[in-house]
Image (cartoon, rainbow, N blue to C red):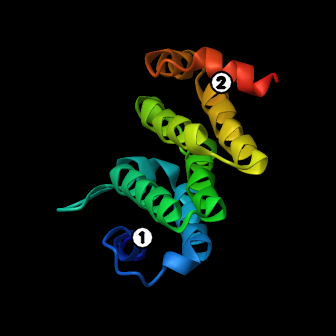
Amino acid sequence: MWNFYLVIIDVIVNNKGVLDDFMYAASVPLINFMAKNPEQFRNANFDGHGSCMDMMFGLIGKIFEISRMKEDEISAMCSVTLLIALLENVPGIESSLHNILEFLIKELNDAQTPEYKCMLSQGICMTLYYNTSHALMSLEQLGCTGNWINLVFT
């Protein structure tokens, strides 16, 4: 089962171009891996490829990169969905909250449409729900707590 996870990630991250137009469809089984066995997802390690979490962050970064090249925020929403799925399904990833927030804040700074900004803000809210103190510390470290709060309440 986990070999299929590795294949999906590899096809997108290593620029095979096969799934670039089907990232939404490719994300569904990845979310199912998280939901089906979150403990194994958090702890699984593939020799030579790293952990599931590391591979997922690599994939998320690649999807954001492809979306920027295409100038397509709709495609980037796939990465936000994966980040939210991590927060909803995988307990014990407090140490990854900073990485998640970095992705979301970086995208929020470049977001153009109100819908995309709203989805990114939803992801940030999910980090606050997941672990408020860790999320607030990360937002402070990134120097954007005030800006984000102003964005949400304006």
Q: State whether residue 86 is above or below residue 2.
A: above
Residue placed under numbered mark 1 in the picture: 5
Asked whether residue 93 is in view, the answer is: no
Camera-side residue: 142 or 7? 142
Q: In this view, does 90 lie to the left or right of 62?
A: right
Q: State whether residue 114 is above or below residue 31.
A: above
Q: Do the residues labelled 1 and 2 touch (CB within 8 Å)?
A: no
User: Who's the residue at 42% across and 74% down the image?
Assistant: 8
Residue placed under numbered mark 2 in the picture: 148
The kind of secondary structure element at disc 1 is helix
Disc 2 packing (10 Å; few <14; some 14–19; many ≥20): some
User: Who's the residue at 59% across and 17% down the image?
Assistant: 145
User: Who's the residue at 34% across and 72% down the image?
Assistant: 10
In the rendered structure, which amino acid carries the disc numbered 1?
Answer: Tyr
Residue lying at the far left in this picture: please name it.
Answer: 48
Number of numbered discs present? 2
Q: Position of residue 122 (x, y in %)?
A: 71, 39
The kind of secondary structure element at disc 2 is helix
Q: Position of residue 40 (x, y in %)?
A: 42, 53
Q: Distance between the residues labelled 1 and 2?
A: 34 Å
Quadrant of residue 1 in the image? bottom left
Q: State whether residue 143 is above or below residue 101.
A: above
- The answer to which of marks 1 and 2 sits earlier in the sequence is 1
Quadrant of residue 77 in the image? bottom right
In the rendered structure, which amino acid carries the disc numbered 2?
Answer: Trp
Q: Quadrant of the C terminus?
A: top right
User: Who's the residue at 37% across and 55% down the image?
Assistant: 58
Camera-side residue: 134 or 58? 58
Asked whether residue 25 is in view, the answer is: yes
Nearer the observer: mark 1 or 2; the answer is 2
